[in-house]
């Protein structure tokens, strides 16, 4: 393989059979169960990379079910997200993700820098409850519950959040172990079609685990919860800060 051919096909590894197709990536009927809670401001400040700034001591814990997506098929995941500001614009910093299918773990980390690790999330509706769970290493470390579709909300309640920028800290090491890529990445979701939004009484329990430290942002007070069904497109992102140089 000559150099020109190599560079034309250097999209993912292995070069002759990449794990995922090229984007953008389309998601249909994605379900998001988000619990918003008040946490410890000092713990949050320690983890947010500059120049992002903490908006308030609030954390969003999201249980996500993805029944159909481009190249990634069906999977579930859990995200821990922190509202932030960047140059006076409000957005979200995605701190941690736990996913039960390896392909979106690979694609998300390689392209955007999604902080995905393999985990065992759960998402189900049973009787009058919507339940989200996260197991890691055989241990239950997160449980969220909400009354199933107790109250219907206006779609505009969540539209601002979906349209706001999302930020990621992308780190890829050099072959000698030093950082080769260390960037703050920003992306915007596109073609958002919110099909339904509901809320209800909710709860969230987090357990400490040394390898999956979701409880490092402890639950001080649960504020609200939402169950959202939507279609959306995940496009490529952009680098806003290169921590290794200009």
Image (cartoon, rainbow, N blue to C red):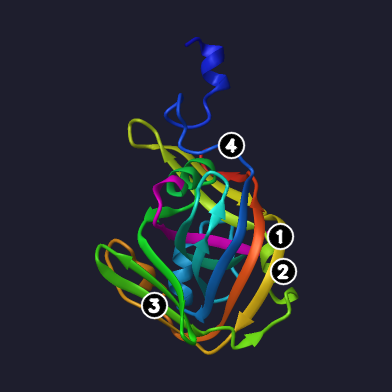
Of mark 1 and mark 4, the one earlier in the sequence is 4
Residue 228 spot, x, y in % from top left: 61, 72
- For the stretch drawn in magenta, what is the main secondary structure? strand
- Cα distance between the residues tagged 4 and 2: 27 Å
- Numbered label attached to residue 192: 1
SS category of the residue bearing label 1:
strand
- Numbered label attached to residue 143: 3
Q: Is residue 8 above or below residue 58?
A: above
Furthest-front residue in view?
127
Left/right of residue 72 with respect to residue 162 in the rendered view: left
Q: Are marks 2 and 1 in contact (CB under 8 Å)?
A: yes
Residue 19 spot, x, y in % from top left: 45, 37
Left/right of residue 139 with respect to residue 47 in the rendered view: left
Q: Is residue 204 above or below residue 134?
A: below
Q: Residues within 10 Å of mark 3 (few under 14, many from 20)?
A: some
Q: Residues within 10 Å of mark 4 (few under 14, many from 20)?
A: few
- Cα distance between the residues tagged 3 and 2: 26 Å
SS category of the residue bearing label 2:
helix
| Magenta range | 86-103
Q: Residues within 10 Å of mark 2 (few under 14, many from 20)?
A: few
Q: Quadrant of residue 223?
A: bottom right
Q: Is residue 89 visible?
A: no
- Cα distance between the residues tagged 3 and 1: 28 Å
Kindly identify which residue carries mark 2.
159
SS category of the residue bearing label 3:
strand
Of mark 3 and mark 1, the one earlier in the sequence is 3
Kindly identify which residue carries mark 4.
22
- Cα distance between the residues tagged 2 and 1: 8 Å
């Amino acid at each position: 393989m000559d150099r020109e051919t190599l560079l034309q096909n250097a999209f993912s590894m292995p070069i002759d059979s990449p794990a995922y197709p090229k984007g953008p990536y389309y998601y249909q009927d994605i379900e998001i169960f988000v619990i918003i809670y008040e946490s410890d401001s000092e713990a949050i400040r320690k983890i947010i990379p500059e120049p992002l700034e903490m908006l308030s001591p609030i954390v969003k814990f999201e249980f996500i079910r993805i029944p159909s997506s481009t190249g990634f098929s069906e999977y579930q995941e859990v995200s821990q997200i922190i509202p932030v500001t960047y140059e006076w614009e409000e957005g979200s910093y995605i701190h941690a993700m736990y996913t039960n299918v390896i392909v979106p773990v690979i694609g998300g980390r390689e392209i955007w820098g999604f902080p995905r690790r393999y985990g065992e999330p759960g998402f189900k509706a049973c009787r009058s409850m919507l339940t989200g769970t996260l197991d890691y290493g055989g241990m239950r470390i997160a449980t969220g519950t909400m009354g199933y579709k107790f109250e219907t909300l206006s779609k505009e309640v969540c539209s601002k959040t979906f349209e706001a920028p999302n930020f990621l800290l992308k780190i890829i090491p050099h072959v000698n172990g030093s950082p080769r890529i260390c960037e703050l990445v920003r992306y915007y979701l596109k073609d958002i079609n919110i099909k339904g939004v509901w809320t209800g009484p909710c709860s969230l329990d987090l357990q400490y685990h040394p390898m999956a430290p979701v409880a490092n942002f402890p639950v001080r007070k649960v504020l609200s919860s939402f169950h959202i069904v939507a279609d959306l497109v995940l496009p490529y992102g952009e680098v806003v800060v290169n921590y290794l140089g200009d």
